[in-house]
Image (spheres, rainbow, N blue to C red):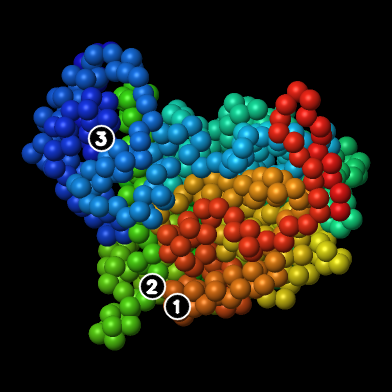
Amino acid sequence: MNRDFIRKAVEEADLNALRLALLQATGDPEYAAIPVTRIDVRAGAGTTYVVAEEHREALIDRAVAFLSDAPESHLRTVPSDEYLRDMMELVAGGEPISDKDFDIRKPVPAFDAYPRCANWSDGPVSLSDDFQVVIVGAGFSGLGMAVQLERLGIPYVIYERRSEIGGTWSINTYPDARVDTPSAMYEFSFEKLYPWTEHFARQAEVRAYLEHIARKFGIFDKIRFNHEIKGGRFDEVASLWRLDIVDGSGAQVSVAANHVISASGLFSTPRELSVEGVDQFEGEIVHSTEWDERHSAAGKSVAVVGNGSTGVQLLGRISDDAKQTFVFQRTPQWISPRERYGEPMSPGDSWLRRNMPYYWNWTRYTGTLPVLNLYQFLVPDPEWQASGGLINQPNDALREAMTQYIVQQVEGRADLVDQLVPQHAPFSRRLIVDNGWYRSLLKQDVELVTAPIARLTRTGIVTADGAERQVDMIVSAIGFSVEKYVWPSDYVGRRGVHLQERWSKDGARAYLGMMIDGFPNFFVLYGPNSQSVSGGGGTIPTQIEMWTKYVAQLIVDTIERGHAAVEVTHAAFEGYNERMDEAATGLIWLTDTQSTDRNYYVKDGRLQVNMPWHYQVWHEMLAKPDLSDMALTGRVTVQAVTESASPVRLSA
């Protein structure tokens, strides 16, 4: 490889991650002695560490020399826990890591083949030919669950109502749909060195990644596309779920399942535009999930309704094509930049990840540092508030920095600043990544509308102030009905209880976000209050690995103990939810009065999406199933896998 190319690649690199990779590859203690500097990123929302300026050039020279001498021939090994912990501490200049944090961070660099996986205690067991786990949905969660079961040798099938893999990454094909987490972190830890082409991958590339996972790990042929689960009933005598499924031809079939895992996700049910006159409008109304190549804004007068993640992502492309664009904003959002958002992976960056031993691993770790301690932004500080502060010192500092970003983006226009700066605190709602949204508002043919929509006419939108704007197309970017977990499937548990009726009282609830008492062998992934936003490096794929490991381990534990069914006890379910509600009461999601209304995190004054605990507590809860919280019933006979092994026999 050309030495100039290598130098350019190294100059663009994360030098702290490269320092650790060189230390691990060579064992040279001089790399450990190179000092690092702590810096705040994202206006203090996170912290990272960079190689001290006076040592950069020398490190670059040494890295170029190493990389010019066949680095790919280096034999890569998995470090011991002791060595790994020492290396992690070196990333932060020797700052100690607690035992709890090391347990949490250990899987992040992904040195092991499967950093988060369930295991048999004494090797796999033989299962009967009719033993089957049903997974509902072939998105991130469904595929992550399938990988766990595939490793364990537990038979499964995935039913997917669409014609392709992807889940939300199949549904959402609107202009410029992409991840708002760096691609290198928005991936499973068991698939190494995936060749992302952008730092924040677009929808098509994310869906292609999931297709790659399904084919590489032997999942694809076990997916039944165009099959929709209409519902199911738990057979208490046989300890089985009897599922009603409609296949691609429209025929209804019945399937028996030992366990059912709903992986339909949080963002599977689009919220409909509900406003007077919607049936009278003669133009196009397109929900963002319905956008495909048939739709175009070219030459049209377009209304974009909504300014959440979707509305912010698509505005730039829509406004570039449209003759006139009206942006209807109900509530201002905190919208902030991300480093390298929209940028392609450079050839040097891609080459370095492939060829520098351990560099990919350490970029995964350094990439989590800015999001390790987000919990500090969620807890109000009474003393700070008593002295005139709004939430606490770090949250208020972030608010000020993000306010200044808005001012800068709209070039100080007071009319826009007044309409765009939110009243709620950062993190009390989802933070949005800027995709040029503020800049789009400065275009001559773009108008920000903050008056509420009153009704639609045949040709336009009338707002509460009586003004009417003529539009040809309405793009509805108002999000999803996140409270409709497992919707529209109708699951019936013990004693004929319907899950949707159970949840109709005070919203969807689950134990650890995954289990409901009275519904044995039934699990929900990305379920109620399962989303962690308190830090710990917990991107969504990371959380999916934690959830799926837990579910798979509980299935294994149930089988190994000779039981056919497992469910959380009523006492454990109620106790968990009481503790969770209590923990949520003191956080800004419920204490910031400016955020509790019109916030999908909260419904009827109760936290419904996020989990309220510090990430250390949450990780400990998910580390392994607590069987004292479970009721194990029915009998199953198992035998270690041998050529003469007898099949599993199930009984009530």
Residue that label 2 marks: 379
Where is residue 482? Give x, y as percent.
63, 61
Tell me the distance, in whole angstroms, between the alpha carbons under discs 3 and 2: 34 Å
Query: Which residue type carries mark 2?
Result: Val
Left or right, 12 with respect to 444, comes to left
Q: Is residue 568 above or below residue 239?
A: below
Q: Earlier in the sequence, mark 3 or mark 1?
A: 3
Residue occupying image coordinates x 74% and y 72%:
504
Q: Nearer the viewer, residue 321 or 614?
A: 614
Residue occupying image coordinates x 86% and y 53%:
652
Q: Is residue 221 above or below residue 437?
A: above
Identify the mark at residue 20; answer none if there is no mark: 3
The reply to whether dot 2 and dot 1 touch (C-beta < 8 Å) is: yes
Task: Residue 347: name its quadrant.
Answer: top left
Q: Residues within 10 Å of mark 2 (few under 14, many from 20)?
A: some
Query: Which residue type carries mark 3?
Result: Leu
Where is residue 488? Give x, y as percent.
77, 57
Q: In front of the other: label 3 or label 1?
A: 3
